[in-house]
Amino acid sequence: MNNSPQPAAKGFTRAFYVSNTVELFERMAYYAVFIVLTIYLSTILGFNDFEASMISGLFSGGLYLLPIFTGAYADKIGFRKSMLVAFSLLTAGYFGLGVLPTLLESTGLVSYGASTHFSGLTDSVFRWLIVPVLFIIMIGGSFIKSVISASVAKETTEATRARGYSIFYMMVNIGAFTGKTVIDPLRNMIGDQAYIYINYFSGFMTLIALLAVFFLYKSTHTVGEGKSMREIGQGFLRIVTNWRLLILILIITGFWMVQHQLYATMPKYVIRMAGETAKPGWIANVNPFVVVCCVSFVTRWMAKRSAITSMNIGMFLIPVSALLMACLLYTSPSPRD
């Protein structure tokens, strides 16, 4: 039986295009919520800055650490079932973020409108119900991180892989850009309630992705799927005994915890420094806009260079740019001074 990817138009399979399309919807959903997650935690649920940043930081860290486990389980049940599980969890989680404030409001601890009025929620344990809701999203997101990129790898050949991942990351950043454009006009229309209703938008995006996988995703490339728990355990043991790989995983997890915490804190900073009329969603869109514009050029430019060289250049540019932003913020006078 031939398990190699069957070529579709332009050298890619239908499963490849479905994977990239659902990734577009998933990124729209994720960034629509994540760009204002710390504001949601503080403005809607009453957490202080420290609590909000800790919750968002641990949430981000879990998203990058859990794929070690969910990826192993995905090898057992297959990519299609893994994506169905992932999008089911994400849909439930995002709708949960929207429903939770309604349940809290029914207790009389808070009232929502153009602005939020707390009547005891800031001292109530009920606000910590957000933790299991975010955990559901974390599990679903960890499946996506391990499965979608692996699906792209399986559905491409050595000759088409660079172009395939170029398309993949373009979809990621188009989704990120689109998701972050929703919140600013919503804030202008309904005020603080925008931080609640944006979750329903994300829930519908992942629901569309769930339906797309259910009806359209079918891969003929199934090598490696259906592993026994013993095989998965043996593979996992090889991972945890590979200290170099473990160090790399911990470094990457730590980096993304810090990176996403900075990213999540940025909207609060922008609004406090520039006022309520500021548009943090558009400012955050500089990153995906640059990626979408440059990914095709960079892919061609780096085509003849090794993967290690590409990674080294990227890992050099990321901290340098972060350092430049920190210096700029430190030396710039506050607009309120």
Image (cartoon, rainbow, N blue to C red):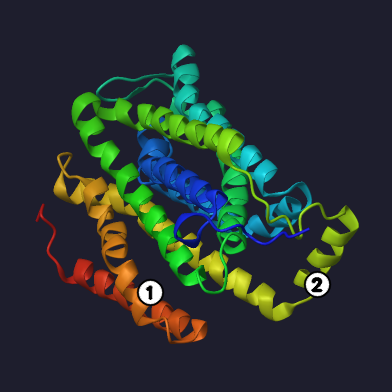
Task: Return the residue found at the far right.
Answer: 230
Q: Amino acid at mark 1?
A: Thr
Q: Nearer the viewer, residue 58 or 300?
A: 300
Q: Where on the picture, by quarter, is residue 169?
A: bottom left
Q: Is residue 131 visible?
A: no
Q: CA distance from mark 1 to mark 2?
A: 32 Å
Name the quadrant of the N terminus. Answer: bottom right
Decide: is 95 above or below 78.
above
Name the quadrant of the C terminus. Answer: bottom left
Q: Residues within 10 Å of mark 2 (few under 14, many from 20)?
A: few
Secondary structure beneath dot 2 equals helix
Residue annotated with mark 1: 299
Q: Residue 306: x percent and y percent?
A: 49, 86
Q: Residue at x 58, y 33 (%)?
A: 215
Q: Is residue 279 left or right of residue 53?
A: left
The circle drawn on residue 264 is none
Q: Residue at x 76, y 60 (%)?
A: 224
Q: Amino acid at mark 2?
A: Arg
Decide: is 303 above or below 8.
below
Secondary structure beneath dot 1 equals helix
Q: Where on the picture, by quarter, is residue 128?
A: top right
Q: Is residue 58 visible?
A: yes
Q: Residue at x 39, y 31 (%)?
A: 201
Q: Residue at x 65, y 38 (%)?
A: 85
Residue annotated with mark 2: 238
